[in-house]
Amino acid sequence: VNHAAATGTGTGVLGDTKTLNTDSYSGGYYLRDITKPMYSTGGKIETYTANYGTALPGTLLTDADNVWTDRAAVDAHYYAGKTYDFYYNKLGRNSFDNRGATLKSTVHYSRNYNNAFWNGTQMVYGDGDGSQFTSLSGALDVVAHEITHAVTERTAGLVYEYQPGALNESFSDVLGNLVENKNDPKWLLGEDVTTPGIAGDALRSMSNPNEYGQPDHMNEYQNLPNTREGDWGGVHINSGIPNKAFYNFVTTPGITKDNAGKIWYRALTQYLTSYSQFIDARNATIQAATDLFGANSLEATAVANAWASVGVG
Ligand SMILES: Cc1cccc(C(=O)O)c1OC(=O)C1CC1
Ligand SMILES: [Zn+2]
């Protein structure tokens, strides 16, 4: 048999055990998930190692006995599967291209690499330096954040600069937390992999962006240059404003996470375009809420109020 779905076990970055969808071949097992609906058109979830170099995708991981000990790889694979399931089951999207494209991840990228990114073709995760970060695939909100960059690229195409770039970042934070689906009242990002030596901190907070140096209102918008040093006009900084708008919306009594996700996803995929500004995101999310729940619905009203609360609209 050249390809058969198998179930393995693995240890994650935080030492937890999880079951993995793998692919058996004559000599052992590939870290390849062939159980998803995408497989009907050849789509798979595959996890590779760069073996601390920078050549991509690197080597597809294999194992002799289907008991996996590469913790970064275990989590990259497992969390990519969880993210695929969320998009398919909750939002009706079949992988990042909505046509069942294979989800490819590479772990152990470079050395002491405090970064994770979508490179236009695949996800890439560093192992962190052990102080600022531990292996970045060890957090579901991070993995879903990166995969959402791919979704955004294939849909709205929000360019990675200034307000469209901050929206790009915010949609990745919003979907990252919706996929992670923790009961976290602070709606933190990256809490599971930032500063392994310090408990309770994170990379960003959607409930209180100021806590991590982000604005939470238009009157704190930071005009930064479109350079690497300027974070491309502050895409990871000014994202605090749309993040706070989403937080105020999703915590409005009567609003559910599922409905909030449907509204934000519909705005991203049906209304936003490459150079959309914050005001366009306000209008798009109101329109999406109106489409789904009606003009004077609790959802449409709460969306407008949420953006107004951060000085947009
Ligand atoms: C850790 C990191 C560094 C630089 C860019 C990104 C990026 O993907 O924008 C990044 O990942 C995140 O922000 C994830 C959500 C925590
Ligand atoms: Zn990002």
Image (spheres, rainbow, N blue to C red):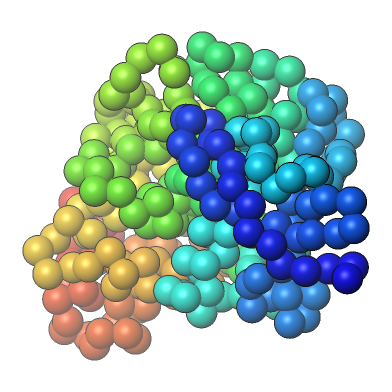
The image quarter in which residue 191 lies: top left
Q: For the point 59% across and 42% down, which residue is it?
A: 10
Q: Closest to the observer: 159 or 61? A: 61
Q: Return the residue nearer the eye: 57 or 189.
A: 57
Residue nearer the viewer, 267 or 24: 24
* Residue beneath the point at 38% across and 73% down: 262
Q: Position of residue 58 (x, y in %)?
A: 86, 39
Count of all numbered marks drawn on residues in the image: 0
182 above or below 269?
above
Horizontally, is 231 left or right of 24 in the view? Answer: left
Q: Quadrant of residue 136?
A: top right
Can you see residue 63?
A: yes
Taking the spot 29% from the left edge, 73% from the top edge, the residue there is: 259
The quadrant in which residue 59 appears is: top right
Direction from residue 176 to residue 108 in the image, left or right: right
Whether residue 30 is situated above or below residue 195 in the rendered picture:
below
Question: Foreground residue, 36 or 154?
Answer: 36
Q: Where residue 211 appears, x then y in whole percent? A: 27, 25
**Could one spot residue 164 in this view of the protein?**
no
Q: Which residue sits at x=41%, y=62%? A: 281
The quadrant of the image that shows the C terminus is bottom left
Q: Picture coordinates of residue 301 (x, y %)? A: 17, 72
Pinpoint residue 166: horizontal percent, then vertical percent: 49, 45
Q: Residue furthest left?
A: 253
- 185 up-or-down from 97: above or below: above
Left or right: where 120 falls relative to 232: right
Viewport quadrant of the N terminus = bottom right
Please indicate whether residue 149 sits to the left or right of residue 291 in the image. Answer: right
